[in-house]
Image (cartoon, grey):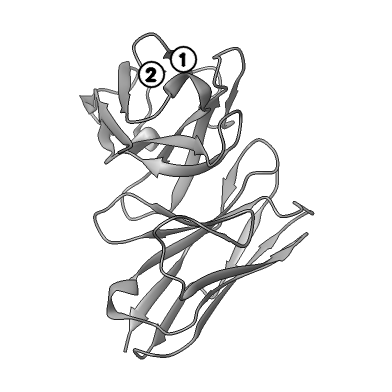
């Protein structure tokens, strides 16, 4: 099974800050990686797929990069509505696996 | 507008069974893979199962293999999860998620239902 390791597990930043979350796969997954945002009490929402493709309707301050085993989600200018937990997920092979999540808090 | 409406959750005793349903609207259901993902209280996301768009192939997490069955009825635009031999550790919100973003057998989850809560307890 492919293990997905996210870091940090939580981050606190101010409005307007740049926030970076990393995700490492235990083996190469090419670019078959997605990022999801989950706000408290809501279903997850797809932000990024194929490592860097922005899902329709997602603000351009979200971006993704990486390939192989190392991936990054960047929020270029943190907004109050970005308060959420973020998960990565590999879609390279079954079983599909998620990272443990990164909780983003606003200072 | 894509909508996924789950139903069938509830309280069940250990060893019992439940069948979850997910009614799909707003897209050509028969051309997309579908998935179940669960989230235990206060925990992260856990993939449970996937089915191809035609229904001819399925995959399961080891934690549910042999106990859960995913299937779909493309004539009714509905996805199902039959859950047998339920355990306390199956307690979670169960989400139905559409595969995507392209049609075919792709396993990013581009739309999610609101979830249905399954509680396994005596």
Chain containing the residue with disc 2: B
Residue B80, numbered circle: 2
Closer-to-camera residue (B31/A26): B31
- Say left or right for A41 vs A31: left
In terms of secondary structure, where does tag 2 sit?
Answer: strand
Q: Position of residue B17 (x, y in %)?
A: 32, 15
Mark 1: few/some/many CA within 10 Å (<14, 14-19, 20+): many
Q: Give the residue drawn at x 40%, y 42%.
A: B111
Q: Name the residue nearer the viewer: B100 or A11.
A: B100
Rendered view: A104 above or below A41? below
Q: Position of residue B65 (x, y in %)?
A: 56, 23
Residue behind mark 1: B71
Q: Tell me the quarter of the image containing the C terminus of chain B.
A: top left
Q: Point out residue A107 in the picture as x, y percentages from the top left corner.
A: 31, 89
Numbered disc 1: secondary structure: strand
Q: Quadrant of the N terminus of chain B?
A: top left
Q: Chain of mark 1?
A: B
What residue lies at 46% left-to-right and 44% top-to-bottom?
A: B110
């Amino acid at each position: 099974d492919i293990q997905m390791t996210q870091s940090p597990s939580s981050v606190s930043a101010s409005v307007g800050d740049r926030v970076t979350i990393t995700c490492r796969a235990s083996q190469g997954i090419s670019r078959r990686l997605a990022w999801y945002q989950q706000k408290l009490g809501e279903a997850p929402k797809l932000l990024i797929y194929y490592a860097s493709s922005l899902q329709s309707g997602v603000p351009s301050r979200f971006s993704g990069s990486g390939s192989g085993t190392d991936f990054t989600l960047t929020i270029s200018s943190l907004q109050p509505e970005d308060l959420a937990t973020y998960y990565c997920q590999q879609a390279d092979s079954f079983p599909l696996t998620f990272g443990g999540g990164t909780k983003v808090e606003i200072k | 507008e894509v909508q996924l409406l789950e139903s069938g959750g509830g309280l069940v005793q250990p060893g019992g069974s439940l069948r979850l349903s997910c009614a799909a609207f707003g897209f050509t259901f028969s051309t997309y893979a579908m998935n179940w993902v669960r989230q235990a209280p206060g925990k992260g996301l856990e993939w449970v199962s996937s089915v191809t768009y035609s229904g001819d192939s399925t995959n399961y997490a080891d934690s549910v293999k042999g106990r859960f069955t995913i299937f779909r009825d493309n004539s009714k635009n509905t996805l199902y999860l039959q859950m047998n031999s339920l355990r306390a550790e199956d307690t979670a919100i169960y989400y139905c998620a559409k595969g995507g973003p392209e049609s075919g057998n792709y396993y990013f989850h581009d739309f999610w239902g609101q979830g249905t809560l399954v509680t396994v307890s005596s």
